[in-house]
Image (spheres, grey):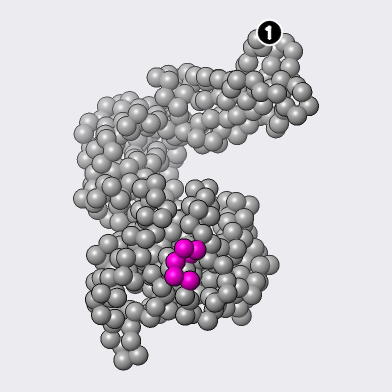
Amino acid sequence: MKNKLKVILIGSLIFIMPGKSMAAFGDTTACLLKDNKQAAWTFTSDDGFYESVCFYVSLFRKYGLKGTVGLVPDWVEGGSGYIRDWANVGESHGAWPEWKALIKEGYLDVANHSNTHMFLLKDDGTELDDVKLEMEINGAKEAIERNLSDNYRCINFVYPYFKKNNIVIEKVKEQHEAARGGWGTPADYNSLTSPNFYDLRSQVLLTETSLSEMNGWVDRAIANGKWLIETWHGIGGVGWEPPSPETCESHLQYVSRKSTMLWVGTLTEVVKYLKERKHSTVQLISSTASQVLLDITDTLDDDIFDYPLTFKTEVSGAWDKAKVLQNGEAQLVSVVAERGMYYVYFDAVPDSGQVELTALKAGDDIVIHSTAAYPFITAGGKSAAVITASICDKDDSVANTAGNSITFSVSGAGTLVGANPVNAINGEATIT
């Protein structure tokens, strides 16, 4: 016997406020940072201590964070096995299948930390010969991408021992989009408008670094609108200058609490965003009282630069919500009032097709489609099905609606399991 499924969309009320000028209708700018945040924060962990990175990822899951690991290919299982760095001798640097599985979870991306973690500069300050530099820098990148496969692109470099000169930097530029260093002057924060992409500064964690000092870095980044990169190694006695697990968790919890103002992005994400924003152009193709059509392009390699930028478009106060459509993917966004003007914020990828913004008035229909997976038998012998409801616009495009939830109910026999209502993520909610 089939049961009937009823789903109800619970949304936010939007109040329409009259009286705005139409003079700048359709004007669109890229936000300084993703989701219009005030500052950016990137967690990096050097040397690839596998157990330490697994610990970091467990905290990323817990607190909704993400980060970047700098891998040394020759230290990963299957390499030469020779480690000259005392802080890494005897430690586990994982195996490629382990790294691949961990990265697939979505909490990490990978930076190239050189092939063998060799000093790229000799004692006299000159660089290694070109053959060794090629192997340490570009050879390592090729090894990372080959072993992670699935068309993985490793676009960032992390200088071993933070050492470099202009010749090393030029070699890094050949196949990398950015490179992170360590301490330095000016202050160890990066500009959001004109960062030195091949000498990105970072705050380096030491065993003696206090929690208040770490949290102070975050506060200063937010107050001054900067990009804070933190450099960690191992944790709890592993690797070079390892902080304690307790200090690490307390700090990451603090970062999570600041996420309303702070964009937590990996090294790859922030580099892509800042470069795309700098090189993007927005063209207003047309505008009517109920629709804006935009063409957003950039001058970068689309095979690498495919990260969505957050844009801000001025619209009419008569709009309540808007449907944003690009390349068949839809978002439903609310109109926000700022200093007597009205805007919508949305994400779009340059060079991925025109962007269409269409006004939705209060009361416009939003359709909810539901599907049930084939019933399976639980351990208790009871039949169950996984039911997914998708929030769609009137054109049946799944709409990425923020702040909405779906309430499920069953008429007839059967009981729903799990919290109800369910928060909609990327326009979908699932219950059993």
Screen quadrant of the C terminus: top right
Q: Which of 314 and 18 is in front in this view?
A: 314
**252 vs 127: above or below:** above
**56 vs 213: above or below:** above
Q: Nearer the viewer, residue 205 or 115?
A: 115
Q: What element carries label 1?
A: loop
Tell me: 372 left or right of 183: right
Residue positioned 42% across, 79% down in the render: 161
Q: Nearer the viewer, residue 242 or 399?
A: 242
Q: Which of 72 and 421 is in front in this view?
A: 72
Q: Name the residue under label 1.
A: 1
**57 vs 237: above or below:** above
Counting from the top left corner in percent of width and height, residue 207 is at 60, 78
Q: Which amino acid does label 1 sit on?
A: Met
Counting from the top left corner in percent of width and height, residue 98 is at 53, 55
Task: Look at the magenta stretch and give its main secondary structure.
Answer: loop
Start-end of magenta stretch: 76-81
The answer, for residue 352, to whether it is visible in the render is: yes
Counting from the top left corner in percent of width and height, residue 307 is at 36, 47
